Image (tube, rainbow, N blue to C red):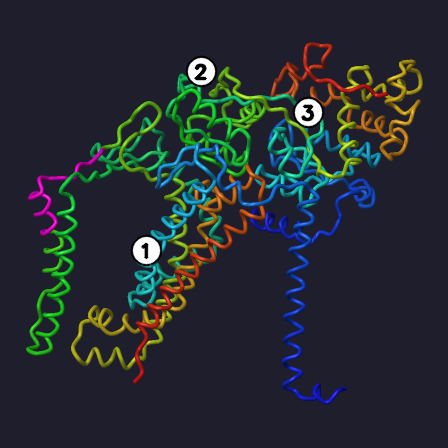
Amino acid sequence: MPAFLRNEKVRGILYQIITIALFIAFLFFVAQNTAHNIEQRGIKTGFDFLHATAGFDITESPIPYTPMDTHLKVFEVGLLNTLIVSFWGIVFSSLLGLLIGVWRLSPNWLINRIAAAYIETFRNIPVLLQILFWYNVVLATLPSTRQSINLFDTVFINNRGFFMPEFVFGPGAWMIGAALFLAVVAIYLISRWAKKRQEKTGEQFPVFLTGLILLILLPLLAYFLAGRPITAVMPELHGFNFRGGKTYTPEFLALLFALSIYTATFIAEAIRSGIEAVPKGQKEAATSLGLSPLQQLRLVVLPQAVRIAIPSIINQYLNLIKNSSLAAAIGYPELVTIFAGTSLNQTGQALEILLITMLTYLMISLIVSLILNWFNAKMKIKER
Amino acid sequence: MKRLLKLSAVTALATATLAMAGTLEDVQKAGVLKCGVNTGLPGFSEADSKGQWRGLDVDYCRALAAVVLGDATKVKYVPLNAKERFTALQSGEIDVLSRNTTNTETRDTSLGINFTGVMYYDGQGFMVPRALGVKSAKELDGATVCIQAGTTTELNLADYFRSNNMKFKAITFDTNDQVTKAFASGRCDVLTTDASGLYATRTKLKDPDKYVVLPEIISKEPLAPAVRQGDDQWFDIAKWTRNALLTAEEKGVAMANVDEAAAKSTDPEVRRLLSVEGKMCENLKLPKGCFANAIKQVGNYGEIFERNVGVKTPLKIERGLNALWNKGGIQYSPPFR
């Protein structure tokens, strides 16, 4: 053995170089082989297909789409639908998870048991089955179009979906938005002032109530001042289906419902473990300060618990986004269903499309975790 | 599962070394033919209560196995949905795709596959609940349509509504069963697929008489088995298996009389078909009597048709375009010469 190889440090580096070289060689072999096999079998390659006409319809799209559009547009529609269902899924699962997590620790036996039963049930059933289950429940229990459940002639519910009035903003509608912004700024200023005042004098100010009133009153005022610029377009039965208004399809609702309910169980557990990790002394100290149980929870326990729970909640958000791809089972047109499904099949370019799809999920997940990690770092207790 | 399959197909493409030419040797070595079929379409490919696969597409697999291995039972069925089928074939997961697949230019030229002869001439139609009172496809403006993802039907549908200036909403599902379920529960007004598929699906519905198939046929759907491109020998075998089934019907050679025909027939083409004369099987590098095996074990094209989809089955489909060329149809085999 040459002398330099007896040096442990040199040997370590050498092993690493060999490993990397082998890995690169393997990747090279795979790429080469793939290209060769594809060429041999006469399979079309390249990304030209993105600009070819898709030729098929998509059930729901947040942007205008016709079968004359390209596969690139299909990708956009799929991505947007993925983001929409993920966004609402995160909102609903967080709220539900928080509630159930707190309930899980409630001294009330019944509430405590309900939360436990909920968590144990929904956490332990594969989410794909839950999606299929809710979809079939929705389809089986709701009436047909002509026998729609009619709520005050504004909301119609049937097995084609929930049909609601859509609000159309006319000229002057910006004033309402401005009023809303004004209200938010005012609430921020008031709460700062109220906090300072409380610190100085100990007097409390009803910030929540004032805020609520401002939030409702200011936009309402603007609405009438601007001459009522918002009109509602009502859904109307027209031939086979309802037209006009906003529609939420059974596919969307079933997916959103299943994802929210499933992910909420994990968030609830994260919250629970967060709460349990808050030292008992904190709660006792809060009690001795004379805070009510609700105040203890809101002002002392939860802020610390959430801090501890954030990292595992981030994981659950990422899982939810990835699980949304299970929508393929019930035909909700998100990225995997229409792009990695229909487009792939119509063009036959599996490699390219799967590559694009995987990279897209990777990007979404990385961006979300970047944002949340930043939030996490901001929320962490600054040790001085 | 589906994504797993697709991913595995991609990995197979990535890692498979030149395993392509020589499907025949692979099948002979394995002693079993891997045949991609529909997950469930009555009359074409469906597992019965005993787990036995039945149908027109299935019988083609059996015939091919009889030709290649001498035994129609040596088939491994791989049930595939529309989206999985081509990747399964490309990656070598199956040896032949016999899954009511329409032969189109794009598929033939850009997927790396070759279509053998047409097993069933079909066309796309529409089915609606009788209660809707719709008499023609032209009245379907604004309808919601249930459809299977990744099919030619999906594209035809968009074309048809566009050219007739009508609007529609398509709800797409992965498997035929999901489409049927959604249609039965009223999620959509219309179910569209190949006409044969409509009749097949109707037999699955709880009350088949409550549904009607509209008269319009909006497309040509020649359903043909497919094999991988680049293996000409295997392509030839797949093609001539289908031709043998048609020729047998044309010449009146059936399951029951194949031995008798081999012994007594004086018709030179029958003698060549059954390997009494000539080197038809040897040309394909197959043992003597390969086509006779298929006819004996599976039957000729007419028998296969009548057994699975014919007028005596629940599907009640007439021969129509699928009758032999000399009986008013367009099914035609090149000569065994």
Q: Residue A230 lies in magenta, yes or no?
A: yes
Q: Are marks 3 and 1 in contact (CB under 8 Å)?
A: no
| Residue A320 left/right relative to B230 | left
Label for residue B118? 3
**Chain of the residue that carries numbered disc 2 in the rendered image:** B
Distance from the alpha carbon under mark 3 to that under mark 2: 29 Å
Distance from the alpha carbon under mark 2 to that under mark 1: 46 Å
Q: Position of residue B100 (x, y in %)?
A: 63, 30
Q: Which residue is mark 1?
A: A91
Q: Which residue is mark 2?
A: B136
Q: Which picture quadrant has residue B318?
A: top right
Q: Nearer the viewer, mark 3 or mark 2?
A: 3
Distance from the alpha carbon under mark 3 to that under mark 1: 53 Å
Q: Are marks 2 and 1 in contact (CB under 8 Å)?
A: no
Local packing at callout 1 (Cα closer than 10 Å; few below 14, some 14-19, many 20+) is some
Region of the chain picked out in magenta, as a range: A217-233
Mark nearer the N terminus (3 vs 2): 3
